[in-house]
Image: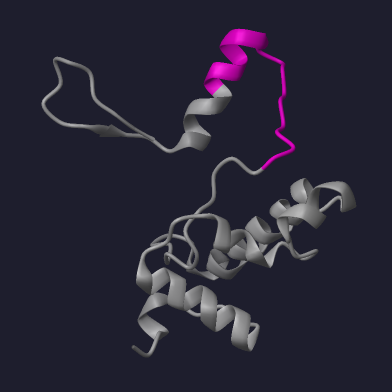
Amino acid sequence: MLWKSKKMRAYKVKAIDKILPRHVRENFGRNSVHVTNKVAFVRGPMLGSLLHKHWDKSFCESTEWQFSLSCCESSISAPYNINVDGSNVWDRVWLPESERKIVEHRKCYGEWIRKDELKI
């Protein structure tokens, strides 16, 4: 998440998963837990974590799984053409061309690759 107050010279950035729990606790109590049933934010496909490279594919797979759980009830998925496995979540978000090619590779070959593995 990105913001800048009137007096700030530069933007500040903080991950949304760091901000939301604090606001939930402030508004609903210290022991409160809230879980959304709709996908609100997605991590870009195969961005390549600097700390947890072994989790890159799992990040993408979990995004697809969450999307399938939140949208793929028969009454919801039919009019929106949502795949049961959630793999078309990437068609519903803006992606730069290089990330779009990663998604196309996933659709064609069934496996995730990193941007540095992509043959342009």
User: Can I make out residue 13 in this image?
Assistant: yes
Give the number of marks.
Answer: 0
> Where in the figure is residue 75, as x and y percent of width and height?
87, 47
Up/down of 108 relative to 70, above or below: below
Residues shaded magenta:
22-38
Q: Where is the N terminus found, in terms of image quarters?
A: top left
User: Can I make out residue 111 in this image?
Assistant: no
Q: Residue furthest front?
A: 79
In the foreground, 45 or 70: 70
- Is 25 colored magenta in this rendering? yes
> Where in the figure is residue 98, as x and y percent of width and height?
37, 73
Up/down of 48 relative to 93, above or below: below
In the foreground, 109 or 25: 109
Q: Is residue 56 left or right of residue 8?
A: right
Quadrant of the rendered structure where residue 106 is? Answer: bottom right
> Where in the figure is residue 24, as x and y percent of width and height?
61, 18
Q: Residue at x 59, y 63 (%)?
A: 60
Q: Is residue 11 left or right of residue 13?
A: left
Q: Is residue 119 left or right of residue 30?
A: left
Q: Residue at x 57, y 10 (%)?
A: 26
- Is 94 colored magenta in this rendering? no
Q: Residue at x 76, y 46 (%)?
A: 70
Q: Where is the C terminus found, in terms of image quarters?
A: bottom left
Q: Residue at x 71, y 62 (%)?
A: 86
Looking at the picture, the colour scheme in use is: one colour
